[in-house]
Image (tube, helix red, strand yellow):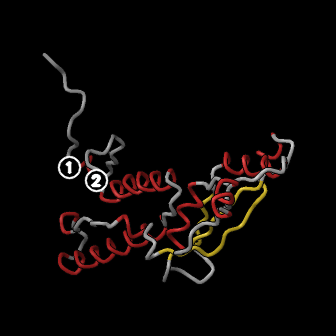
Amino acid sequence: MVQQFFRNPTEEEKRDFTDVGPSRTKTHKEDFVAELALKRHEATKAKIPFFKKAAMDDFEQHYQGQAQISMRKNGYVKREDIKPYNIDWDKYSSPSNIELIEVYEQRDAYASKKQAFDVFVKSFRYKYKNYGIEGSHNMTVMEEEVFAVKRARATYNNKEFTEISNAEKVSELYTGKPAVKKDTKEDLDKKSK
């Protein structure tokens, strides 16, 4: 005979019952946050700006509206009445919704400590259009440390550095202007002929 370890609580026990076991179903918010983390990770890897806060606010606004509709209809919030939020993830990293505000260089103390010269990393600051208070909700994407070190080493050795980092290439999409690329010696030779 097999004994059952778990049993259903009685009506009297349910009154003070708090389930501490694993949740059997995921909530819409848990699904959204998991997908948001994945999309944000992909954007970070590709050095594309992704506005997480705007996505979270849109999600909250949708569900608050759905909860109000359910409350008016039933007198309480019924989970089945809440429609899932079909989200357009591209909206939060699209060049039509984001603009490049500024590009600045910042000294990287950690990389400078490892080198015989100062290393400055380029940072690209973006703003989500028509969102938040002016001057707030900005996002910064930094270039890879490898490019900053290569550029600093070339400057230190009085050599020309012509490579463009992925973050700089992506910034072209948000300005409409190409990233500044220095001509190589071969390009200069071709132009002079």
Q: Element type at marker 1?
A: helix
User: Crowding near pointer 1: few (<14 within 10 Å), some, many (20+)?
Assistant: few
Residue at 52 percent of width and 75 percent of height: 176
The quadrant in which residue 122 appears is: bottom right
Q: Is residue 27 left or right of residue 147?
A: left
The amino acid beneath tag 1 is Glu
Q: In this view, does 13 lie above or below 101?
A: above
**Three-letter amino acid code at disc 2?**
Arg
Task: List the single residue furthest toward the front.
Answer: 193
Circle 2 packing at 10 Å, graded few (<14), some (14-19), many (20+), is few
Identified at 28% across, 73% down, the residue is 67
Residue 189's place in the image compared with 91, above or below, is above
The answer to whether the residues at label 2 and label 1 have Cβ atoms under 8 Å apart is yes
Task: Choose between 83 and 47: the one closer to the eye.
Answer: 47
26 or 9: which is nearer to us?
A: 26
Please tell me whether mark 2 sits on a helix, a strand or a loop.
Answer: helix
Dividing the image into 4 quarters, which one contains the C terminus? bottom right
Mark-to-mark CA distance, 2 and 1? 7 Å
Residue 157: x and y in percent read 84, 46
**Image coordinates for residue 4, horizontal then vertical, percent:** 19, 26
Q: How many labels does the image show?
A: 2
Q: What residue lies at 79% left-to-right and 46% top-to-bottom?
A: 153
Please name the residue that numbered disc 1 is placed on. 11
Q: Height in image: 160 above or below 114?
A: below
Mark sitting on residue 15: 2
